[in-house]
Amino acid sequence: MSELAIFDGPKAVQSDPGDAFNRFPSEVKEEIKEAVLDVLDEWSMSGINITKEFEQKFADWHGKEYGLGFNNGTSAVRAAMFAAGIGKEDEIICPSITFWASCLQVYSLRGNVVFCDIEPDTLCLDPEDVERKITDRTKAIMVVHYAGMPADMDAIMDIAKRHDIKVIEDVSHSHGALYKGQMVGTFGDVSAFSLMSGKSFATGEGGVLITDNREIYERAMAFGLYARHRGNFENDYIKEGLGLPWGGFKNRMHQMSSAVALVQLDYYPEQIEKIEKSMNFFWDQLEGLPGLGDHRRPEEGYTKGGWYAARGLYRPEELEGLSITRLCQAVRAEGVSTSPGVNKALHLHPIFNSIDVYNEGEPTAIANAAEDIRTPEGSLPVSEGIQERTFSIPLFYNYRPEVIKEYAKAFRKVVENYKELLDDDPGNPDTLGGWSTFFRE
């Protein structure tokens, strides 16, 4: 009889996980509810007093001078682009493996996105490919700390300095993560964070931007933060536009989200410690196992913060070519939710190739470009093949070693008996991952 649950063997996961996957204890949930109810009682949902308190507290946490709250991370990223001076015919370089909101908004600024490849082990942008993509129109590098993994900031900052271009950090996956002991989001000229409910640091819906640069701060505020254009500006050319949002957007943060954020910020550093301990313990159980690689950095000074969208690396060549699809099927049968892949490679989507969004008579991807800067299929080999070499893993918010061992056992049991899965392996479908999510749509 087979040991694998997919062939009617006993499941690896037998226990109730208890609070292993619970984000907050009940007392913290109650504190969050009270903070939100206070906003409702005061009827200050569209105010800015609580938002301003959160902005400063979040900036202080990162050692930055300025913070700005937004209605979502997409707006925060777009404001960061505008604040960095990106406009007509300017280019940003962005990894193709990321959520669309890391770059798609640049078209609304009449700028352009040039995609770069990623490193297969970090899943973050490849600095060597970044440098290859720089032109005299490059205005900024969009650094995405993907799935909690800090990107190679030493290399990126060196490239930016040598070419005199801005660095924007998209920290939406990696709140509180460390690169060589320094918090991500503190390296670039400006950083933006999504705070939607699925994130490790979540407010329900929201975004935040931080910077030390006064002009960037003022430009971001002028662009779309309605009711923040009444004074306290130091740059004369920005003072001229006081009273109305430059971008014509109303992107301010909802104060119920601000209230949630303020409470969570009190507990998030402690939460990070529990997640780090739990997730490292999980991977320690799988150390040395063929086929499975841990998406973490072993060096001291590196952490992944809240481990958002936690992933593992798959090496099918070590398991006789067993498909990631079949591996995940077998692990799910053991009682663990897992799926193949990550975000689809953005450079292959029609909106970055053929769609005319603004009725300009040609694809938006080149309407404001001096030449055809689209990235054809086959140009970014790692990005185009990474779906078959990644998979999701459980995210443990609390350190419960016996529970974690059972979930790790599911992966170990499947790998140790992988030969039984080879004969009826259906292979991978034509498409894995998702445009808007990490999962197949």
Image: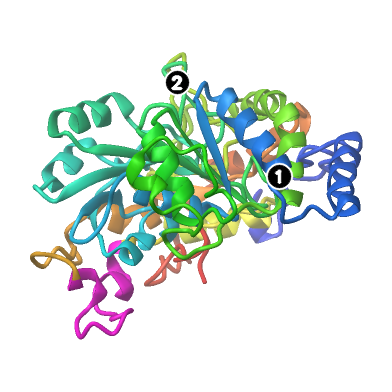
Residue 283 is left or right of residue 267, and the answer is left
The amino acid on which the numbered mark 1 sits, given as a three-letter code, is Ser
| CA neighbours of label 1 inside 10 A, class few (<14), some (14 to 19), many (20+) | many
Q: Position of residue 406 (x, y in %)?
A: 72, 37
Q: Secondary structure at mark 2?
A: loop
Compared with 344, 19 (above or below) is above
| CA neighbours of label 2 inside 10 A, class few (<14), some (14 to 19), many (20+) | few
Q: Secondary structure at mark 1?
A: helix
Asked if residue 291 is among those painted magenta in the image, a careful observer would answer: no
Q: Residue at x 46, y 52 (%)?
A: 242
Q: Which residue is mark 2?
A: 298
Q: Mark 2 and mark 1 in contact (Cβ < 8 Å)? A: no
Identify which residue, 154 or 331, lies in the foreground.
Answer: 154
Asked if residue 356 is among those painted magenta in the image, a careful observer would answer: yes
Q: Position of residue 216 (x, y in %)?
A: 38, 39
Q: Position of residue 38 (x, y in %)?
A: 88, 46
Question: Residue 195, which numbered label?
Answer: none
Q: Residue at x 71, y 59 (%)?
A: 8
Identify which residue, 416 or 393, lies in the foreground.
Answer: 393
Q: Which residues are magenta?
A: 347-367
